[in-house]
Amino acid sequence: MKNIIQDLTKEELGEVIKPSFRAKQIYNWIYHKYADSFEEMKNLPKEMREKLDEAYTLTPLKTVMVQNSKDGSRKYLFELHDKHTVEAVLLLMREKEYHEDGSVKHQERYTVCISSQVGCKVGCAFCLTAKGGFMRNLTAGEIVEQVRMIKKDNAIDANRRVNIVFMGMGEPLDNLTEVAKAVKIFADPEGMAIATHRQTISTSGLSTKIEKLGKMELGVNLAISLHAVDDELRQQLMPINKAYNIESIITAVKNFPVNDRKRVMFEYLVIKDVNDDISAAKKLLSLLDGIKAKVNLIYFNPYGGTEFKRPSEKEMKAFQEYLTKRGLHCTIRESKGLDISAACGQLREQESVRPEA
Ligand code: SAH
Ligand code: SF4
């Protein structure tokens, strides 16, 4: 298997390809012109193109399936070189923008939800990804390529702004080295130029890794999958809570560098009769006291074989209202792509194309 050229930062590329201005040209071909072969890179000398082709691949992922949702989102199933598969989703979001005079306009924004691992080790009770177990980490290039493929397939102009959320398959902080590298490659101004404040890393709460991510000063947004406010329940839902309890997460968050205009997002998956009681909302409020936080309530998305249930709209609204009335920013996440299982926690490796063990 050849090396993946998308695994390289521009600086690393500049070290292997001399003179280093060639790295910029190659980046331009890959991330602006969406080249799929070195042959196309006509402003590079022929010998260079041949050498690159011998050493590197530009197409580490193969699209095996695309599903369109009624709401405009599209789910992609990508096959990796070792035949494992991962999913990524293109979401269309309406985002608020402010004019200079302070008036508000709404704008359609692309958000790409990407995977960081094949499967996941964390094993949350409510999550479909967890059911398939853990296979392997993705490399930075395999992470970056999900976005490049989706931008190319949808003819999204290289300069058009997109947001990235690490909310697909896997626990990003369990693959921190490659995820942090992908963040930097995404942000390269001569590559995709996706500013780090447009990238969000969602974690089940690996406190020590949250601290480590903070120290890297990448400028990414942090999202914590909290889902329960007391350790006993959280442990049942998320076994990782045994190693990293709620208090350790809150401490790590308090030490995390947050962009002036941003807040740490706490995701709270609402499961009927499990964690939807108003007493939980009350506890959540005190837990987040003193943190620049916003809460995102997520409807539990049911799937075949789960005993958990989706709460009603009324229950959701009541939970939200309790928090907002007391000054906490709290939104209810629209479940995008429900009809194609592209919504949260519904991404998993496809059994049918999984390689033989
Ligand atoms: N592993 C990371 C990144 C995946 S994000 C994390 O857990 O944060 C996926 C989000 O969807 C998480 O907040 C996760 O808790 C949530 N989720 C998992 N299963 C779900 C389900 N069945 N319905 C709705 N959300 C779910
Ligand atoms: Fe892994 Fe996140 Fe699913 Fe938990 S919710 S099993 S951490 S992907």
Image (tube, rainbow, N blue to C red):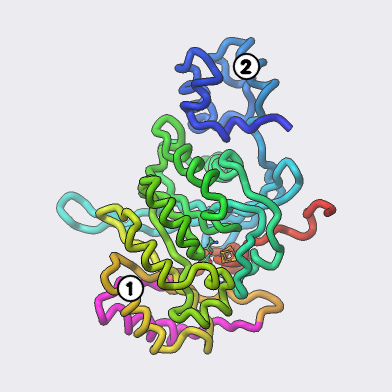
Image location of residue 169, percent across then percent down: 60, 58
Q: Secondary structure at mark 1?
A: loop
Image location of residue 111, percent across then percent down: 46, 53
Does the stretch in magenta take in 319? yes
Q: Residue furthest right?
A: 356
First of labels 1, 2 by sequence position = 2
Amino acid type shown at disc 2: Arg
Does the stretch in magenta take in 309? yes
Residue at the (36%, 47%) spot, across then down: 219
Q: Residue furthest left?
A: 101
Residue at the (81%, 51%) spot, across then down: 355
Label 1 sits on residue: 288
Circle on res. 49: 2
Locate residue 328 relative to residue 355 in the image: left or right: left
1 or 2: mark nearer the eye: 1
Residue at the (83%, 54%) spot, across then down: 357
Q: Looking at the picture, does residue 242 appear above or below residue 101?
A: below
Residue at the (34%, 73%) spot, across then down: 330
Q: Does the rendering let one see residue 350?
A: yes
Locate residue 158 relative to residue 79 in the image: left or right: left
Please provide the residue range marked out in magenta. Answer: 307-332
Say which of 259 and 208 sits in front. Answer: 208
Q: Looking at the picture, does residue 38 appear above or below residue 277?
A: above
Q: Looking at the picture, does residue 147 appear above or below residue 107?
A: above
Image location of residue 118, percent across then percent down: 66, 54
**Ligand 1 image-quadrant field:** bottom right
The quarter holding residue 314 reads bottom left
